[in-house]
Image (cartoon, grey):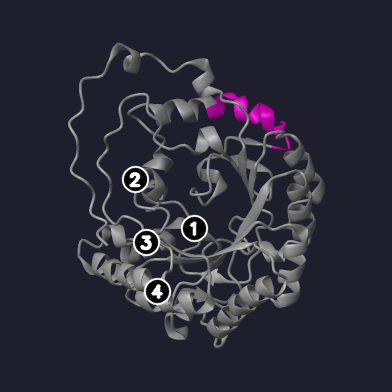
Amino acid sequence: MSTAPPPPEELAPPSPEELAPPSPEELAPPLPEELQVEVTGACNLRCRMCLVRYAPAVGRREGALALEQFVELVDSLPRLRKLTLQGLGEPLLSPHLLEMVGYAARRGAEVGFNTNGTLLDRATVERLISAGLAWLHVSLDGATAETYEDVRHGPGLRPRPGQFERVVSNLRGLMETRRALASPTPRVQVVFVAMRRNVDELELLVELAAEVGVDELFVQNLSHDFADTAGSAPYGELRDYVEEEALFRSGDDAAEEAFTRASARAERLGVPLRLPRVVDRPDRRRRGERGCGWPWESAYVTHRGEVQPCCMVMGSERAKLGSLGARPFQEVWRGGPYRRFRERLLGEDPPEVCRGCSLYRGVF
């Protein structure tokens, strides 16, 4: 499967409408129907590609978003239809996760989250299904223990022997429990963060996904190059890691070849497989076209109540548009910082934090 970008198309000169300033409605859209909430900032792993590894540790108690604040936030969005309960922390460490899933599901929202899978035992799966969990993503960044455990370290920044087998066992238990309960949900997706150190195992991971019986294998690139953080701690080590590992910076065909092999194997085994691009898309946006849909369609709220434009930022100090401790979400959504952020995404000078984003560049 080739992921090479199509040849760029010639664009006609901009029309008068395209040169016109954005309308007030474009800068202050209706309240979003989707939302992502970091229910905890605490995590039991220190993965190489995550800010949690390089920043001060967050305790389970201090890292938990209060249930009352969560309920108030959800109630402020009458059109909410999809809710993602994850951020930098491991959602299963939140003491309120089950109540949050149940409350939002009863409100009619499709609720899910991404987990590292280490705490996903069968009893927890049963409770999540009972609460109404609609979808669940499980991270698995390798098809062997050696590769996986080299990426996802424990708090001591060292591999945890047996962790790979534990996550795979929990994944099997998840699928078996869903079948035993005759439940169509949660839809289960394995998420693989493709890097130089693990991309050769993608074909083997396709085979594992087929054997376990998950609904989809989702492959993504590293989320950001962090070029906007030069000289800023704690991003230096993370920026260096991305420089070494990002496929979109490799300049060789190894990733394309690995993707081609994985795609062929997935087709033979009947595994739905999503692959990212590894070459930046040419910037063919017209003036006035959105560089990214996030600030119009969704928002990201940290466990501290900080409102950010998206989940790709990884660090609230890089793009904070408001705080729920100071203003209700509706006011933040329609406020000046959000308006200015949207206006720049419609123009030729996007926010600095967006320039290195894999989603903005089309390689996520």
Against 11, is 85 above or below? below
How far is disc 2 from disc 4 in space, using C-alphas?
Answer: 31 Å
Secondary structure under tag 3 reads helix
Q: Amino acid at mark 3?
A: Val
Estimate how packed mark 1 is, as few (under 14), some (14 to 19) or many (20 or more) residues with alpha carbons within 10 Å.
some
Q: Nearer the viewer, residue 302 or 298?
A: 298
Residue 63 position by quadrant? bottom right
Q: Nearer the viewer, residue 82 or 265?
A: 265
Q: Residue at x 55, y 70 (%)?
A: 46
Name the residue carrying label 2: 361
Residue 155 position by quadrant? bottom right
Q: Are marks 1 and 2 in contact (CB under 8 Å)?
A: no
Q: Amino acid at mark 1?
A: Pro
Upstream in sequence: badge 4 or badge 1: 1
Residues rendered magenta in the picture: 324-338
**Disc nearest the viewer among 1 and 3:** 3
Secondary structure under tag 1 reads loop
**Disc nearest the viewer among 4 and 1:** 4
How far is disc 4 from disc 1 in space, using C-alphas?
Answer: 42 Å
Name the residue carrying label 4: 269
How far is disc 1 from disc 2 in space, using C-alphas?
Answer: 24 Å
Upstream in sequence: badge 3 or badge 2: 3
Residue 60 seen by the camera: no
Secondary structure under tag 2 reads helix
Image coordinates for residue 193, horizontal then vertical, percent: 43, 65
Name the residue carrying label 3: 242
**Disc nearest the viewer among 1 and 2:** 2
Q: Residue at x 17, y 31 (%)?
A: 10
Labelled disc at residue 86: none
Name the residue carrying label 1: 234
